[in-house]
Image (tube, rainbow, N blue to C red):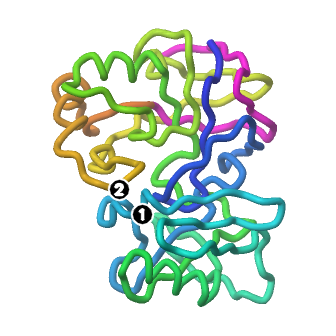
Amino acid sequence: MQVTSLYIYPIKSCAGISLTSAHINVRGFQYDRQWMLISLEEGFLTQRQFPKMATIKTHLTGTHLVLNAIGMPTISVPLLSNPSQKPVSTRVWNTDVMASDQGDAAAAWLSDYLELKDIRLMRMCDDSEKSFVDSRPILIISEASLEDLNQRLPQALPMNRFRPNLVIANCQAYEEDTWQQIQIGTMVLDSSKPCTRCVITATDQQTGAKKGKEPLKTLSSYRKSPRGVTFGYYFIPTASGLISVNDHCRMLTLY
């Protein structure tokens, strides 16, 4: 088995970035879900309510996170936290995370593009124990699992509908469900829980357009559990290090 793709999503629920390697620690990949959009009315924002967020693209320079969207000027925010910004408590579902506001320029840019009022871009504090992920830090999906699903769907879907961090090749479909512990390169990851899927999977990640009831309709016919409809599995890194595309993977223990 080996890693064939690696993705991070710097701003929660916005477009991902494909990387060849990334540093990782127990909180997840560096810069993954480190920023998040909030509003006074909605709380934290995701594609569940605002699918257009999928079309906000980002890339990293050595010093800044750069935001791009069709019809908008490019804007950037520093990668490093500003010590003069007083942290405030924000909430992702039932978890409180300390974060700092990234300023009026970014807020105005996002409000203009999404046509919403009072949006703020928040950055998690460096000492936060958790990023802005919904659940666990690393989502793994195998190529075989997507291939199996696509054979059941009326129209095949790309992997980006499921927003994984790592894509693994050369294993059986849904084999990731059975790994209790896996080694990727020199890094060891512990399994945590299956990923329950939501309506974001029905959003075209290139255009932000809703595309009907698939893949949830098909997944619910054979991947429904008491937790919900599942696809992919969450893992937690046990230490800090580096993971790269083409790293070999091996199971250490199985359920």
Left or right? Give the position of 159 relative to 215. Answer: right
The residue positioned 27% from the left and 49% from the top of the image is 199
* Residue indicated by mark 1: 53
Q: What segment is highlighted magenta in the picture? A: 233-255
* Residue indicated by mark 2: 208
Circles 1, 2 touching at the beta carbon (< 8 Å): yes
Q: Secondary structure at mark 1?
A: helix
The residue positioned 29% from the left and 54% from the top of the image is 209
Left or right? Give the position of 76 relative to 114. Answer: right
Q: Main secondary structure of the magenta part?
A: strand
Q: Secondary structure at mark 2?
A: loop
Q: Residues within 10 Å of mark 2 (few under 14, many from 20)?
A: some
Question: What amino acid is at disc 2?
Answer: Gly
Please tell me which residue lies in front, 77 or 124: 77
Q: Quick check: 102 above or below 56? A: below
The residue positioned 69% from the left and 65% from the top of the image is 65
Separation of marks 1 and 2 at Cα, in angstroms: 7 Å
Q: Quick check: 70 above or below 29? A: below
Task: Residue 6 in the image: state x and y as whole percent.
Answer: 63, 35
Residue 16 within the magenta-colored segment of the rendering: no
Task: Residue 47 in the image: state x and y as whole percent.
Answer: 36, 60
Please tell me which residue lies in front, 199 or 94: 199
Please tell me which residue lies in front, 47 or 25: 47
The residue positioned 32% from the left and 42% from the top of the image is 197
Task: Residue 177 in the image: state x and y as whole percent.
Answer: 44, 22
Residue 21, quarter of the rendered image: top right
